[in-house]
Image (tube, rainbow, N blue to C red):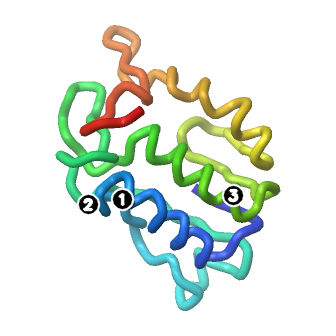
Amino acid sequence: MKIQGVGAGTVWNALAAINVTYGGNIMVKGELSSAYLPRVRRNDVQFALRAVSSFESGARTAASGRHMPSVCWHAHRDLFREIFKTNPNAVIRTGLRPGVVYAGLDDFESRFPRTYYTNVGSEWSPAYFGSLCVGICD
């Protein structure tokens, strides 16, 4: 994902806040620091989320049920909300579906709930993104 309008510190603070709920199981894949210039600029960060353990809260399974280090729909939602608390006008571009861009808090809150029903399975065996959580999610 790519976030415009916040710095790396905001993302780290948001990650720390949601990790209270997810038992420290959510991490950033790769580096998220100003020292890593190709991906981080002052108010423009790009990163991916990963679960530390694919068997703990905040992780999600594949449509087949296989455990993997991907992060669930709820953890993404919680992170985005934390980021928008700091800057309600931030712009978040996700990799869930091509072209999904949330331009501010209001846009996010109105459109994000529909992504729960994004099919990440197959045409013959559909599986909804929001239903593949490991652990307890609300």
Which numbered mark, 3 or 1, is in the foreground of this view? 3
Q: On residue 85, which mark appears?
A: 3
Q: Residue at x 45, y 40 (%)?
A: 74
Q: Quadrant of the C terminus?
A: top left
Q: Earlier in the sequence, mark 2 or mark 3?
A: 2
Q: Amino acid at mark 3?
A: Lys
Q: Residue at x 42, y 66 (%)?
A: 28
How far apart are labels 2 and 3 at the CA level? 25 Å
Residue at far top of view:
124
Helix or strand or loop: what does disc 1 sit on? strand
Which numbered mark, 2 or 3, is in the foreground of this view? 3
Residue beneath disc 1: 26
Residue beneath disc 2: 52
Across and down, in percent, residue 128 comes to 42, 22
Q: Residue at x 43, y 29 (%)?
A: 129
Q: Are marks 2 and 3 in contact (CB under 8 Å)?
A: no
Q: Earlier in the sequence, mark 2 or mark 1?
A: 1
How far apart are labels 2 and 1 at the CA level? 6 Å
Categorize mark 2 by other alpha carbons within 10 Å: few (<14), some (14-19), many (20+): many
Q: Amino acid at mark 1?
A: Ile
Q: Earlier in the sequence, mark 3 or mark 1?
A: 1
Q: Are marks 2 and 1 in contact (CB under 8 Å)?
A: yes
Q: In the visual, does 67 lie left or right of 97?
A: left
Helix or strand or loop: what does disc 2 sit on? loop
Q: In the visual, does 61 lie left or right of 105?
A: left
Query: Does 21 sit above or below residue 3?
Result: above
Across and down, in percent, residue 65 comes to 20, 28
How far apart are labels 3 and 1 at the CA level? 19 Å
Query: Does 57 sit above or below residue 125?
Result: below
